[in-house]
Image: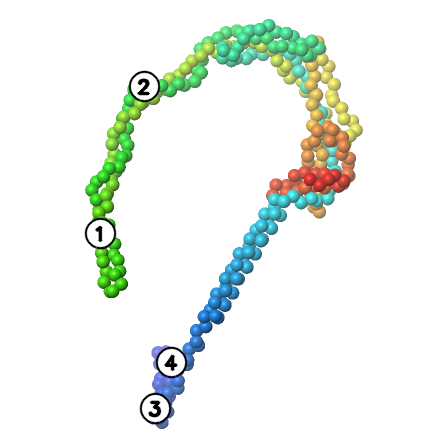
Amino acid sequence: MPLLRLQQPRLLADLRQLRRRARGQPPPPKPTPAPPPSGFLQRLLASWSSHRRGWFVGLCLVFFAGLVAWCTIDHEYQGKVVGLHWTHTTTLQRWQNVNRGDWKTAVRERPELPPQGGRGELAGVAITGCREKHHHDESYACGTENYQASESYSCGSTQSCSTRNNGNGSFSRTCTSVPKTCTRSVTRTRTKYCSRPIYATWCDYVTQAWVEADRTVVRGDGHDGLRFAEIATRGDRERTVQDGSYAVVFAYGDEGETYTRDTPRAEYDGWQLDEPVLVSVDHLHGPTGVRRPTDPEP
C-alpha cells in the first residue's frame, strides 16, 4: 500500500496524457527555463559582490586600527592627589675587618688608612695565604680523529621526456639525458681537540669595609613630621647613612583607579593633597605619566 500511494501522482499524470492523445490534444509545453543573466548583469553582480567584500575588509581594517589606537595611544583622565607617603631609613655603619679573596695578579698589599670622623678612609690589604685554584679550562689540539661525512657524486644519467602538441592532431615526444647525482658516506680526518684544566694562584686576604651594624626606619604621610631617626655613633670608625623614598598616589577615572609614582624629595614637596591632575593612561600598559592642568601638554 505505501508503494501504491507514492506512485499514485505519476499514474494520474500518465492517465491525463493518454486522455489528451485520445482527444487529439497536444501535450502541454514544457516550462521554458529562465534565460541566463546578460553579460552586463553578470558584471554588475560580480562588481557588487566584489564591492561588498572590499567594504567588509575595509571595515575590519578600520576597526582593527581603532582598537590598536585605543590600546596604545595615551588618554588623559582628570584626577587628584589622594596620598603622600614617605619612608626614611637611617643605617649605622661600622668600619671593620672583612675577609676577601682574589687572584694573586689582582692583589696588592697596602697599609690601612683608618677613617677620621667617618670619612677619608682607605682599605688596607694583608694577604693571609695563597693556594693553587682551578681558573678555567683550556682547549688544545691532541691528534686527529676520523668522522663520517656525506658527499655527492655522479652516478649515471636519467631520461627526461616531454610531449608537445603539433597543432594538427599529432604529438611529438622529446627525451633528453640528464646527469644523475647520488650521495654516499665517506670517512674523513680532522684535528681532535681535548680540554685540560688551568690553575692559577688564589690569595686570601684581610681588608676593611663599612659594614651595616644597625638600621632604623621611620614612615609617615603628608609633609609634617618628615624626620630621620637618630642613631648615636661611637668613635671615628662608625658613621650613619640616611636614605629617603617618597611616593605620591593619584586617583583618576570614574571608578577611582589609583596610580602610585615614586618621586624624588624635591618633587614630593611640591604636591598637595586633593590637588587636581591629569593622568595619562595607556589602556594596554596602564598609567604612564601625570601632570598638572596648568602644565603644557607633552
Query: Label 3 neighbourhood size at 10 Å, few (<14), some (14-19), many (20+)?
Result: few
Residue type, numbered disc 1 = Cys
Which label's residue is closer to the chain start, 3 or 2? 3
Which label is found at residue 21?
3
What is the secondary structure assignment of the residue under circle 2?
Answer: strand
Q: Residue at x 29, y 20 (%)?
A: 143
In the rendered image, which residue does mark 2 sit on? 142
Toward the bottom, the furthest residue is: 23
Whole-percent x, y for residue 177 in the image: 22, 47
- Label whose residue precedes the other's in the sequence (4 or 2): 4
Q: Which residue is mark 1?
A: 175
Report crowding for label 2: few under 14, some 14 to 19, many 20 or more residues within 10 A (C-alpha): few
N-terminal-most mark, 1 or 3:
3
Callout 4: 10 Å neighbours few (<14), some, many (20+)?
few
Report whether 57 appears left or right of 277.
left
The correct choice, above or below, for 8 with respect to 73 in the image is: below
Q: CA distance from mark 4 to mark 2?
A: 99 Å
Q: Quadrant of residue 157?
A: top left
Residue 94 in percent (x, y) is at: 65, 13
**Which mark is on residue 5?**
4
Q: Nearer the viewer, mark 1 or mark 3?
A: 1
Q: Are marks 1 and 3 in contact (CB under 8 Å)?
A: no
Q: Quadrant of the N terminus?
A: bottom left
Please indicate, yes or no, whether residue 251 appears anywhere in the rendered image: no
Cα–Cα span, label 1 and label 2: 55 Å
Q: Which residue is drawn at the image coordinates 75% and 41% (left, top)?
A: 293
